[in-house]
Amino acid sequence: MSRSPTPSPSRIRRARVREQTQTALLESAARAFRVGPYDSVSMEAVAAAAGYSKRSVYLYFADKQALFEAVLRAELAQWSDSMDRAGGTQEEPLEQLRAILIESLEYLDRRPALLRHLLEYGALVAGRPEGTTPIEGDPVFEDWIRTVTRCLDRAVLDGSIPIEADPQREAAWIWQQILGVSFGRVIRTNRSSPAPAQPKASSASAASERTGINAETIRRILQGVGT
């Protein structure tokens, strides 16, 4: 059996430089998109902030949308990791799903820029075929979908949700509910006046008030799974 040739030191160095350059450009783009809306970000500014030429960005990303998608995908991978950790604190599939839902809503509350990025991305891909969900078949969301689908698979196996439920479709439905709750909360917060100071609540109560998450919200989402 022939062995694959060992990469030369120069090839290894070039690969390392490419990886470092791409990482630096992504970090620069993440900062730029976090500070301002999509339309305000330029490839030239992203490159300059990272210490590279505009041409360097195009060696790694076809256009600004491709760069934005790479940033969003990295953000969603981090979100998925936090959901995995939250679900790992529970043993029963339905309780794992409940923990994942709570963490999903709290995560968006902690990162308002991500919520804006999701809205901007939705506008960029608004021309997708009729009848598909906003994330169905979209590689940008595959980490998030995989995390929720794994949990739903376990819930189907143990009978927590109907066996005929399609975990992929249910994950897409859960996505819509989470965004709906999060966007609704932002709208209500922006419309309301500052509330007077209240006595300090317990940590659990304070977390619930901070995120606008309550048991009824989670119950309603869980009740809709598989129906």
Image (cartoon, rainbow, N blue to C red):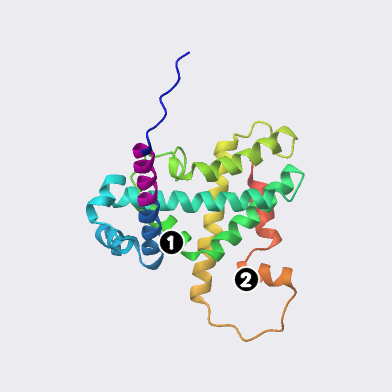
Which residue does the image show at 75% across and 49% down from the upper left?
A: 90
Report how far apart the C-alphas of labels 1 and 2 lie in the structure: 19 Å
In the picture, residue 164 is in which quadrant?
Answer: top right
Which residue does the image show at 37% across and 33% down from the upper left?
A: 8
Which range is magenta? Answer: 10-22
Q: Is residue 133 magenta?
A: no
Q: Is 32 left or right of 75, judged from the image as shown?
A: left
Most frequent secondary structure within the magenta stretch:
helix
Closest to the observer, 66 or 46:
46
Could you say where residue 57 lies in the image, as x and y percent from the top left? Answer: 28, 51
Q: Which residue is mark 1?
A: 116
Closest to the observer, 187 or 145:
145
Secondary structure of the residue carrying numbered label 1: helix
Quadrant holding the C terminus: top right
Q: Is 22 left or right of 59, judged from the image as shown?
A: right
Q: Residue furthest top?
A: 1
Q: Residue furthest front?
A: 9
Could you say where residue 15 lies in the image, as x and y percent from the top left? Answer: 37, 41
Which residue does the image show at 72% across and 45% down from the upper left?
A: 94
Against 9, is 61 above or below?
Answer: below
Q: Which residue is mark 2?
A: 210
User: Few, some or many C-alpha atoms within 10 Å of disc 2 (few <14, some 14-19, many ≥20)?
Assistant: few
